[in-house]
Amino acid sequence: MAILNSSVVLPVEYGREIISGVIGKSKALELGRRLPDMIGKTYKLNVAKYLPIAGWVKNGTTPAGAADEIKNKSLSTYAWEGIDVVAEEIAVIIPVSINTLRDTENYVDLVPQLTNEVIGAFQQVIDSTIFFGTDAPWTNFNGIVADATSAGATVTWDGSSGTSFYGAVNSAMEYVENSGYMPNAILGGPALNGAFRSTITTLGVLAGEQGQIGALPRHIDLTGGFNQSTAFAIVGDFNYLVYAFRQEMEMTLLTEATLVDPSNGNALYNLAQQDMVAFRFVMRLGAALPNPVNRVSGVASGDHLTAGSSAYPFAVIVKSAE
């Protein structure tokens, strides 16, 4: 993190806390795969579109007078498509009265409070957008849940305790596996823990004796960005959630700006006139959900394999209405 005002000295430790907090608590950033930092607004991600098909060389013709059979080797196609990872901005400005700063015991006491609030706000935006597509700034980005639903990768759980939840998790894992991917995590909100505990109680086994389902790494999203009424849990190969930073967190202290209402442009604060300052936090990043063709779920099309319409690296468990 950079602090962009040489006239104000703030401890560097606070800047580090902001960025590590977002990465450490946002499940999208924790589970996803970070690409190299972007040097421009757009990062071109190459994703396999066609895979070649090979075969035994056994069909041929023998022209008159030829001693040996002439065999033609098959032709095939390999191609990829470029997916744009576009850096977009997350930002917030927090105005504060100078008297408020003076009334604190120590000037920088306010900074940890602000950073904690900013961490929570950024985490919620990132996770709700990547998992559910909420207010997505990227073209044709619908989020994991919507894309999984479009692919038919949804499993309905009746909400009862016992082995029915294990059955739902198993079905979700099977969908991901049959799509040619290996599930490496299950993600949900706080209620996910209760579903596992109920299952353990019903089965009468310890947590370490639950086999592959119990061994699947479990992650609980506490950002407020995971809506369990829409999707109770996501199972998938989170290597196929990728993101890249164009600009990590920066904080600028504003002392003379005029702040306006973004909805109508009306002036709200004149910092210099009203004895105020404002803390501006900005981050720029892009994300993508590539779904490359693979040989498990690929479908033959002419001389190559193309991705099956129902193949997807993630599956969603939906809790039925009680």
Image (spheres, helix red, strand yellow):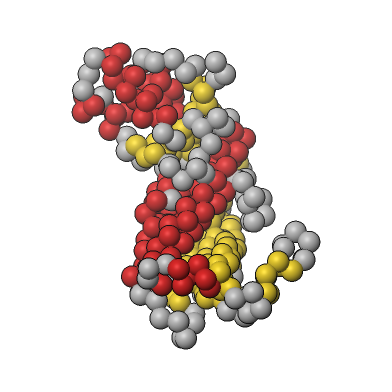
Residue 300 is situated, as x and y percent measured from the top left of the image, at 56, 39
**Left or right: 41 with respect to 167?**
right
Residue 281 is situated, as x and y percent measured from the top left of the image, at 53, 67
Residue at 46 percent across and 72 percent down: it is 102
The front one of 58 and 155 is: 155
Figure quadrant of residue 16: bottom left
The front one of 292 and 77 is: 292
Which quadrant: the C terminus? top right
Count of marks placed on residues:
0
The front one of 34 and 302 is: 34
The answer to whether residue 208 shows anywhere in this view is: yes
Residue at 41 percent across and 34 percent down: it is 190
Residue at 74 percent across and 69 percent down: it is 267
**Left or right: 307 with respect to 68?**
right
The answer to whether residue 44 shows anywhere in this view is: no
Above or below 253: residue 32: above
Above or below 144: residue 113: below
Residue at the extreme bottom of the image, as rendered: 7
Residue 112 is situated, as x and y percent measured from the top left of the image, at 40, 63
Figure quadrant of residue 160: top left
Residue 309 is situated, as x and y percent measured from the top left of the image, at 60, 37
Above or below 47: residue 160: above
Residue at 36 percent across and 15 percent down: it is 162
Which quadrant: the N terminus? bottom left
